[in-house]
Image (cartoon, helix red, strand yellow):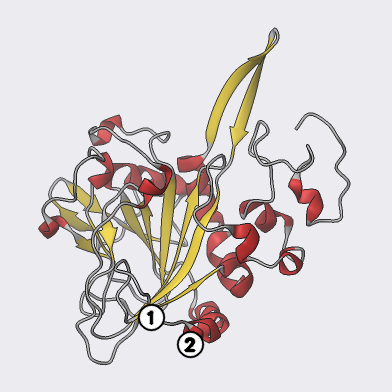
């Protein structure tokens, strides 16, 4: 039996499950996401760690200016480039073992090819696609529902939940509540099951949307092929603060250019798993090399010679 807790949200033939982050398994989460498009991980981050994350990003939030286009309401403040701006977020969320394993199960790509008379087998692990903090202030209008997988020009046909396979999606998002997140103050809304629809069509009836209401430290996971968007903040005194990131397949171009977003001197201080996760690695068989070498040698004190990547 899955360890989903009682506040699962039914919507049509879909149920948006909630799991206790400390007791669930990656397999349970992957099965839930494959069917519904997203799920909740309750209590992913403790209050003390969350307070540190907020402290780390506050100077950048305070320095941000209103967005000039239509995508974000002017009341929203943003921070990007989180691996170096919030090391605590990077360790507690992006490198959380449960999230890493869910990402690996949904976004690892395996393939094979012939080199002469020998068949070679390759495995490309996920990489960090984008990072952000979004603080929606009072009076903000709702964001239009959209799919983030348009970044990679994804074209999907309509399928049923039992036809879903883990080679369908290009990216997986995680949204961590840094404040109480409610319908009134702008909770992310998404349409369960929209990852199964034909990507040529729009979101349709918004009454099918589920709102990602969370306590601080809760997280919401969602496939990038799902229709979603921030909601209106109808309060007069609440700011909804959310940490959001996407992982994508290792051979795809990253939405946020991690190599410029994170100063190289700070990257060199990171652990090797984090360095590789943000892109300083080769996607098997040989995507991402520098001078025909694994780029990890440019941020770590290791010697990498010329060899088959």
Q: Position of residue 204 (x, y in %)?
A: 13, 50
Relative horizontal placement of residue 301, taking residue 92 as reference (left or right): right
Q: Is residue 265 above or below residue 15?
A: below
Using the rendered image of the protein, determine whether residue 51 is visible from the camera's viewpoint: no
Q: In which quadrant of the rendered view does residue 124 lie? A: top right
Relative horizontal placement of residue 15, taking residue 273 as reference (left or right): left
Work out which residue is located at the far top of the displayed protein and give it.
Answer: 117
Q: Position of residue 283 (x, y in %)?
A: 63, 39
Which element is circle 1 on? Answer: loop
Q: Nearer the viewer, residue 204 or 86?
A: 204
Q: Nearer the viewer, residue 114 or 16?
A: 114
> Is the residue marked by circle 2 packed among few (<14), some (14-19), or many (20+) residues within 10 Å?
few
Between the C-alphas of marks 1 and 2, the distance is 11 Å
Relative horizontal placement of residue 275, taking residue 306 as reference (left or right): left
Q: Nearer the viewer, residue 75 or 135?
A: 75
Q: Is residue 65 above or below residue 201?
A: below
Q: Which residue is the site of mark 1? A: 66
Which residue is painted at 51% across and 42% down in the image? 249
Residue 62 is marked as: 2
Q: Position of residue 121 (x, y in %)?
A: 63, 23
Using the rendered image of the protein, determine whether residue 112 is visible from the camera's viewpoint: yes
Residue 204 is marked as: none
Which residue is painted at 81% across and 56% down in the image? 300
Foreground tag (1 vs 2): 1
Q: Position of residue 148 (x, y in %)?
A: 36, 52
Q: Nearer the viewer, residue 253 or 33?
A: 253
- Quarter of the image with the C terminus is top right
> Is the residue marked by circle 1 packed among few (<14), some (14-19), or many (20+) residues within 10 Å?
few
Work out which residue is located at the far bottom of the displayed protein and give it.
Answer: 237
Which element is circle 2 on? Answer: helix
């Amino acid at each position: 039996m899955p360890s989903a807790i009682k506040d699962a949200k039914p919507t049509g033939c879909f149920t948006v499950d909630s799991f206790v982050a400390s007791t669930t398994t990656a397999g349970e989460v992957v099965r839930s996401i494959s069917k519904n498009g997203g799920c909740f991980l309750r209590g992913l981050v403790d209050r003390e760690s969350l307070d540190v994350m907020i402290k780390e990003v506050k100077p950048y939030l305070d320095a941000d200016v209103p967005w000039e286009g239509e995508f974000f309401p002017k009341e929203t403040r943003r921070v990007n480039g989180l691996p170096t701006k919030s090391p605590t977020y990077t360790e507690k969320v992006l490198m959380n073992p449960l999230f890493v394993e869910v990402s690996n199960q949904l976004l690892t790509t395996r393939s094979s090819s012939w080199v002469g008379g020998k068949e070679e087998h390759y495995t490309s692990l996920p990489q960090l696609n984008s990072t952000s903090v979004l603080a929606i202030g009072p009076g903000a209008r709702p964001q239009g529902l959209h799919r983030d997988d348009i970044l990679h020009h994804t074209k999907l046909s309509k399928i049923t939940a039992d036809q879903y396979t883990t080679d369908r999606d290009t990216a997986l998002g995680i949204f961590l509540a840094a404040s109480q997140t409610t319908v009134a103050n702008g909770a992310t809304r998404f349409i369960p099951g929209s990852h199964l629809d034909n990507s040529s069509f729009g979101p349709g009836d918004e009454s099918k949307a589920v709102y990602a209401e969370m306590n601080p430290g809760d997280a919401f996971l969602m496939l990038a092929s799902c229709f979603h968007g921030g909601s209106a903040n109808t309060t007069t005194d609440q700011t909804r603060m959310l940490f959001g990131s996407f992982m994508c397949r290792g051979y795809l171009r990253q939405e946020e250019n991690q190599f410029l977003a994170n100063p190289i001197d700070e990257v060199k201080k990171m652990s090797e798993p984090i360095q590789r996760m943000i892109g300083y690695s080769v996607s098997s068989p040989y995507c991402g090399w520098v001078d025909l070498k694994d780029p990890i040698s440019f941020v770590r004190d290791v010697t990498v010679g010329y060899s088959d990547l």
